[in-house]
Image (tube, helix red, strand yellow):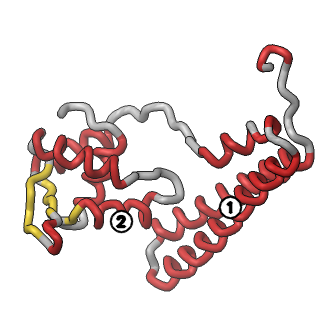
Amino acid sequence: MTDLNATSAAVLGLLHDGPATGGELVAAARQRYGAFFSVTRSQVYRELPELARAGLVRPGKRGARASQQYVLTPAGRTAFKQWLKSAAAADHLRSTMLLRLVNAHRLTGRQRAAVVDEVRAHYQEAIAQAKSAARTARATGDETARAVAAFAQAHANAALKLVDALSSSPPVASATSR
């Protein structure tokens, strides 16, 4: 595996902290990357065997309910560092909530209002979670976690501005998109 995809790199980055099971990696990814990079359970469990076949991780101890820990190998450390130093690929934000919101003008007024309310509630909760994460980061002195929490809060605030703009005057479909 010469070219790591972003999910593989995220997993290898987390394994620098020590051996972990797939479930532990998903939880750690949500905590460390959740504000800007989502990693799903299915992605982690798809990547781990590929990383093992490539010699970048190896199986570690077996845990409860037949869970399998994975350990970063020296080759995995090298591959991760190479990935970190490589040219960055295009950066894309993928938000299914905002995609639904941008297209909600195709719904009835009541349906559109329900979508707007759901999206608004989601981002208000995201702000509350980011504020809580920022308090924890300040208390522990973790500057990286504090910066990620600030980003999460800014992102959620920006999304709420989009919600407000689109809910007050929904976009009109152009003649070519009808």
Q: Residue at x 8, y 68 (%)?
A: 61
Residue 60 appears in which quarter of the rendering?
A: bottom left
At mark 1, the secondary structure is helix
Give 176 or 5, whichever is nearer the viewer.
Answer: 176
Q: Residue at x 49, y 77 (%)?
A: 137
Give 18 or 51, whichever is nearer the viewer.
Answer: 51
| Amino acid at pointer 1 | Tyr
Q: Quadrant of the N terminus?
A: top left
The residue most toward the top is: 176
Q: Earlier in the sequence, mark 2 or mark 1?
A: 2
Q: Quadrant of the C terminus?
A: top right
Within-10-Å neighbours for mark 1: few <14, some 14–19, many 20+: many
| Amino acid at pointer 2 | Ala
What's the mark number on residue 123?
Answer: 1
Residue 118 appears in which quarter of the rendering?
A: bottom right
Does residue 147 sit above or below 84 in this rendering? below
Q: Please state the horizontal and vertical placement of residue 63, each as a whole percent of the image.
A: 13, 72
At mark 2, the secondary structure is helix
The residue most toward the right is: 169
Q: CA distance from mark 2 to mark 1?
A: 21 Å
Does residue 139 sit above or below 68 in this rendering? below
Q: Residue at x 10, y 41 (%)?
A: 53
Within-10-Å neighbours for mark 2: few <14, some 14–19, many 20+: some
Q: Which residue is mark 2?
A: 28
